Amino acid sequence: MKALLLIIPILVLPLLVKSGFFITIMSLFFINSLAAMGLNLIMGYAGQISIGQAAFMGIGAYTSSLLTMRLSLPLPLSILCGTLLAAFLGLFLGFPSLRLSGFYLAIVTLGFGVAVEQILGAWEGLTGGYIGIRNIPSFGSDLLNYYVVSITFFIILLIVMNLTKGRTGRAWKSLRESEIASRVFGVNLTKYKVLAFVLGSALAGLAGSFYAHVIGYISPTDFGLARSLDLLAMVVIGGLGTISGSILGAFLYTVLPFMLSRTQFSLSVLFGALLVLTILFMPRGLAYYARIFYYKYLEIPFVWWERRRKRIEGKVLHTSSGLVHYVEKGSGTVPLVFVHGNWGSWRWFKPLFDVVENSRYRLIAADLPGFGSSDKPKRPINLENYAKELEEILDKLNLKECVLIGHSMGTSIITKLASRRRDLAKKLVFISPSPIKGYRTPKESFPLLSLYRNSFSLVEGLIYPIIKDRKLARELVKDALRMDPRGFLENPKALSEDLTE
């Protein structure tokens, strides 16, 4: 849904702004994004250095142009050939990366880029030399060019995002951090290094092919060292290792020059200063810090509204901490009491309520104070007080000899309760239990945990991968955000307690 909200305006905008110049600039933005995305796969994800990315753009551009003009191949076929040739040469260049790294690999890719530019300039009979190739056929109009490039970009973006989030992306990241550790864990270094170069080169070749047919003119200097350094700056400024960083960097490098074209400000000074400031003060790139700003501030109104909407689907108890919400099902004689964990609510056990035999068991799941639809706790947040809250709930419901079923932090709570009141616990059942000796969250993680309390997106990223039922997952996300904001930091501290002491 969020992707559609972004894509639809981009597709509709050219119909409203009927400026051919504006449409061409937007097409160039998508082209640069493709090339920067390819470089980010090589450098940001796989950790290999490449300073010859523009050469692959040139290979794609000249291949597609010559096949279209001299052999009269259809544009889609010539663009495909340009992309495949760039990928093949990327395969050829990827093998040196198996033995080289760092400065030496940078020299190899730099030499490749310079060599390609010189060959394109010297081979006048085929490429037109430094005069270049003119009147390259387009897709028909600026608007049609835009839609072909933008739709292709979104398709490639979807593929690359799925790739980087899956097994291949994890292998690249491990390769980037440590080749030795990657080899120990069974990562095929040859496969993933070469794959990064092949895919990165293919995207550059595709971008170059589109560039030729959108602009209608190409020359060797369009794909020289300066263009490679521009692509490198796009990735560094936007953010290495993030797809959004490639897009943001491409946007700045494509759109800003035209926005400032009527001013006297030096663009070289602007981009140079931006690059230096990014490296010194924002080494993870602008996209990373923009994302942190979004998580920290921009989702606050939606989270605040959700916390105001407490929906009672079951019953309530009046306790010393206020109202406690719980759900009950079944009329059996054996009480099953479900205790959720951190970020949880009674809803984590909802699937079990549908399958357990109601005639034998009495199922009870409560939102502990500070969770779900229950009121905030009046006591300090720790395992001992959570156990006291649960004890009060069971006493209010006149329950004895219960089968206590805990999930995550809930296992620590029922362990505490069982050590205090053995009459309440007949059996303990642990689901994904927290460590009995406590789990100590590193102090470095607390700033990140503080972001979760005001962000739908971050909480969704935790819950969606483990819950297949999307409707249930959405409800669990909402319940998690209704948790007492103090709990996002205090609950991890509570889990550090050693229950064996």
Image (spheres, rainbow, N blue to C red):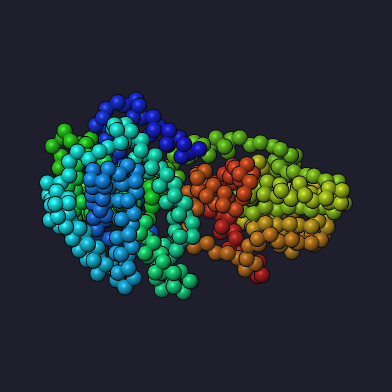
Observer-nearest of 50 and 286: 50
User: In the image, what residue occupies the spot 79% across and 53% down?
Assistant: 336
Relative to the observer, which residue lies in front, 98 or 217? 217
Write the residue at 85% across / 54% down: 334
Q: Is residue 281 visible?
A: no
Residue 353 image point, x, y percent: 76, 47
Residue 419 lies left or right of residue 65; in this view the side is right
Q: Residue at x 55, y 35 (%)?
A: 305
Quadrant of the rendered image containing residue 47: bottom left
Looking at the image, residue 247 lies above or below residue 165: above
322 above or below 430?
above
Res. 45 in view: yes
Left or right of residue 335: residue 185: left
Name the foreground residue: 388 vs 465.
465
Question: Is 392 left, or right, of 132 in this rendering?
Answer: right
Quarter of the image holding residue 191? bottom left
> Quadrant where the C terminus lies?
bottom right
- Residue 169 in percent (x, y) is at 44, 58
Quadrant of residue 279 within the rendered picture:
bottom left
Identity of the residue drawn at 14% across and 52% down:
125
Indicate the position of residue 22 as horizontal and vertical percent values.
Answer: 27, 32
Q: Is residue 395 above or below residue 176?
A: above
Tag count:
0
**Camera-side residue: 48 or 471?**
48
x%, y% of residue 268?
16, 47
